[in-house]
Amino acid sequence: MYKKFHFAFLNIGHFLDHFFMLVFATVAALALNREWGLSYSQLIPYATPGFVAFAVFTFPSGWLADKWSRKNMLAVFFIGMGVSSILASLATSPVQIAVALFLVGMFAAIYHPVGLPLVIAGREKTGMPIALNGIYGNLGVGSAALITGMFIDYNGWRAAFVWPGIFSILAGIIYYWMFCRKSVAEKSASVATAKKAAKAPVKLEKNVFLRVLVLVFMTTALGGLIFQSTTFSLPKVFDERLGSIASSATMIGWYAFIVFSLAALAQVVVGYLLDRYSLRYVFMGVSLGQAIFFAAMPGLNDMAAVIVACAFMLVVFGQIPINDVLLGRITKDEWRSRVFAARYVVTFTVLAVTVPFIAWIHANWGFDTLFTLLAMASAGIFTATLALPHLRPQEVSVEVSNAAE
């Protein structure tokens, strides 16, 4: 029961992490452009400090979690992110909200290098746990547009920062009380149990390990560009293209939520496949699907745009657990947070750069050009997957030889 409750909090944390990072995307698209008299392209660069912090503080978070306590770090994540969100609600200028979003990003950076190692700790099969946890992250992405849109229509954009912030603070207090106050003896027993449950290691050859690591970081960079471009801009894409079927912030939010929620189910399918088949073939299928559906999006409007958006989000979200599963299988528990942190430093650095990139593309050429570029990036990922080794799940280790000692 303890383990189930802890997994539930890890899922809530993943939900909130992605939720808070995308509240401003909807606020900028549907409220601040009117209240502050700035265009969408002028507003969204102020989200950049948050994504820069998301990247910069990822590795320090992983290092501190390995040296101190992952669970204590997660409590800091909940409370710090909630307080920062409330501060964002007090902003009266773009500069003020940029500072608040920097703080949100700083605390949000804790989750991935801390939460994901906790998700897979002591597990032999990691595909489904990571996939289920990933679904909650994706629901956070979708709910950001829906819940923020509803707050904008009924309570104003400031409420979209305040009430989720209060919820996150309460979750952090409860998490600390339930999971961070265990005695040293209890913690030692938990660590021993986790190590006992872990699968006996099968060592990878040094050259295979290094090749996989390079490919992980290469596809992470391109995948980060694709993920950020789609999740951040989709509310605005729908605002421009669903004119005959969505006339309010709430309706746009609902369509975005439906697309993101349906797409989140792809992680369950991918997690199932990763536990049973060659990761290389799963990755090839996902990346090829991205290239096809992005290429189909330019020029579409209304329901056709919704259907194709759902299709490309299925394969975008489907990619998320692949690199995490692979890293989890080839890293040791005692330095896993730092490796996950390095992977997410790459992801979140790309996320930060992508925000002004979206603004520049939208202002000069529109979203059709963006989708064409994303199709090209997906083709690049597909090409990279051809160099992955043919390793079935049972052939991949949870430790490697002295290459990673």
Image (cartoon, rainbow, N blue to C red):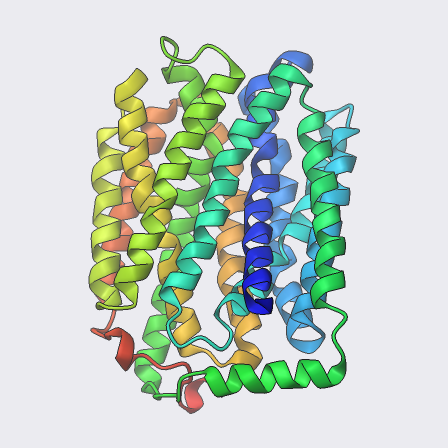
Seen from this angle, which residue lies furthest bottom? 402
From the top left corner, tell me how far across and down residue 42 is, in percent: 59, 23
Residue 157 appears in which quarter of the rendering? top right
Q: State the residue at coordinates (57%, 58%).
A: 10
Residue 188, compared with residue 275, is above or below; it is: below
Count of numbered circles on the image: 0
Q: Is residue 363 visible?
A: no
Q: Which one is nearer the viewer's eye here, 143 or 91?
A: 143
Residue 85 appears in which quarter of the rendering? top right
Q: State the residue at coordinates (49%, 24%).
A: 253
Left or right: residue 176 compared with residue 367: right
Residue 391, compared with residue 189, is above or below; it is: above
From the top left corner, tell me how far across and down residue 350 is, in percent: 49, 49
Residue 349, compared with residue 260, is above or below; it is: below
Left or right: residue 53 compared with residue 290: right
Q: State the residue at coordinates (21%, 48%).
A: 288
Q: Which one is nearer the viewer's eye here, 256 or 292?
A: 256
Q: Which one is nearer the viewer's eye here, 4 or 207?
A: 4
For the N terminus, give its image quadrant: bottom right
From the top left corner, tell me how far across and down residue 89 is, in percent: 75, 30
From the top left corner, tell me how far across and down residue 346 is, in percent: 49, 57
Left or right: residue 213 compared with residue 169: left
Q: Is residue 192 visible?
A: yes
Q: State the residue at coordinates (31%, 42%).
A: 314
Seen from this angle, which residue lies furthest front? 1
Residue 368, compared with residue 188, is above or below; it is: above
